[in-house]
Image: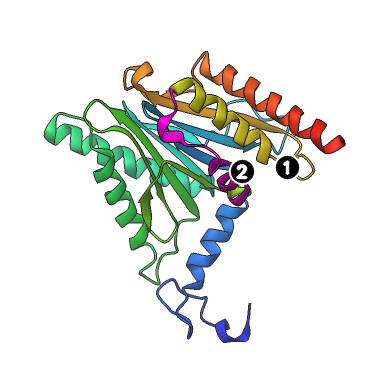
Amino acid sequence: MSSIGTGYDLSASQFSPDGQVFQIDYASKAVEKSGTVIGVRGKDGVVLAVEKIVTSPLYEEDAGTRIFTIDKNIGLALAGLLADGRYIVDIARQEAANYRQQFDRTIPLKLLNERISAYIHAYTLYSAVRPFGVTVILSAWDEDQGAQLYKIEPSGHSYGYFGCASGKAKQQAKTEMEKFKFVEMNTEDLVQNAGKIIYQVHDELKDKDFRFEMSLVSKETNGVHRLNPAPWHAMAIEAGQAAKREDDSDNEI
């Protein structure tokens, strides 16, 4: 850290002379060490895909999942500190349950995004707490609003996206995404391209073993958020492995 920031990183409520909040920068650094997480939004659905780094061969296959169901048609993916993320998942589920109890319907994703964003932002305002070291990606599909995708940063900033990424290979994933026009894709193409992106950005030298996780909420799932759904999960892995082999053969040439 440069000398201009010395002593200004002890509290989340303190700005450095050049206008930075270093605790938020540190939270963002924690996210950058996480496996890559992407969200892609097509014309009839949304796919969340995760490069789940396996740090021990002794772990069970479903341990440490980074994709969660918040309500019937709402999915959430996490990049960053998993413990912080699980707390956000609990908050999101409470908000969804309270809304359903009051209005007898699923909470609109835009409203849930605003509430979680405000909650995450509140943890950047007080010296007694620290920012959450997570990026949150939210997905949903319903008959009224269609496909929806939002991403929330550790600072509390949130935006709607057609495609977004977070984690180690965020920049490479975004570069790959910019080659596609997701809004025109059907569910099958969306799933295959999500698999390709995760496999192509995976760095085998640094992280040899990983598991591909995905979720789908779309017209084809009747608006139900499904984790690793068959046959789409196998389809994404097959497309990803084929794309990886093609990249490897090109590099050999």
Quadrant for residue 90, please give it.
Answer: top left
Q: Quadrant of the C terminus?
A: top right
Q: Residue at x 66, y 33 (%)?
A: 199
Task: Say if 99 sits above or below 12 in the image.
Answer: above
Q: Residue at x 39, y 66 (%)?
A: 124
In the picture as drawn, the residue positioned furthest to the top comes out as: 231
Nearest to the observer: residue 214 or residue 116: 214
Mark 2 element type = loop
Q: Residue at x 66, y 30 (%)?
A: 59
Task: Say if 18 sits above or below 111 in the image.
Answer: below
- Label 1 or label 2, whichever lies nearer to me, is 1
Q: Amino acid at mark 1?
A: Asp
| Numbered badge on residue 238 | none
In the picture as drawn, the residue positioned furthest to the right comes out as: 253
SS majority, magenta? helix
Please give the residue where the numbered disc 2 appears in the rendered image: 35
Q: Amino acid at mark 2?
A: Gly
Q: Residue 237, position in %: x, y?
A: 62, 23
Q: CA distance from mark 1 to mark 2?
A: 10 Å
Quadrant for residue 206, please give it.
Answer: top right
Please give the range of residues in magenta: 171-186
| Numbered badge on residue 203 | 1
Nearest to the observer: residue 87 or residue 216: 216
Is residue 63 left or right of 46 when viewed as pictured?
A: right
Magenta-colored stretch includes residue 173: yes
Mark 1 element type = loop
Q: Residue 191, position in %: x, y?
A: 51, 25
Q: How packed is label 1: few (under 14 Cα within 10 Å), some, or many (20 or more)? A: few
Q: How packed is label 2: few (under 14 Cα within 10 Å), some, or many (20 or more)? A: many
Is residue 140 left or right of 35 when viewed as pictured?
A: left
Q: Residue at x 51, y 72 (%)?
A: 22
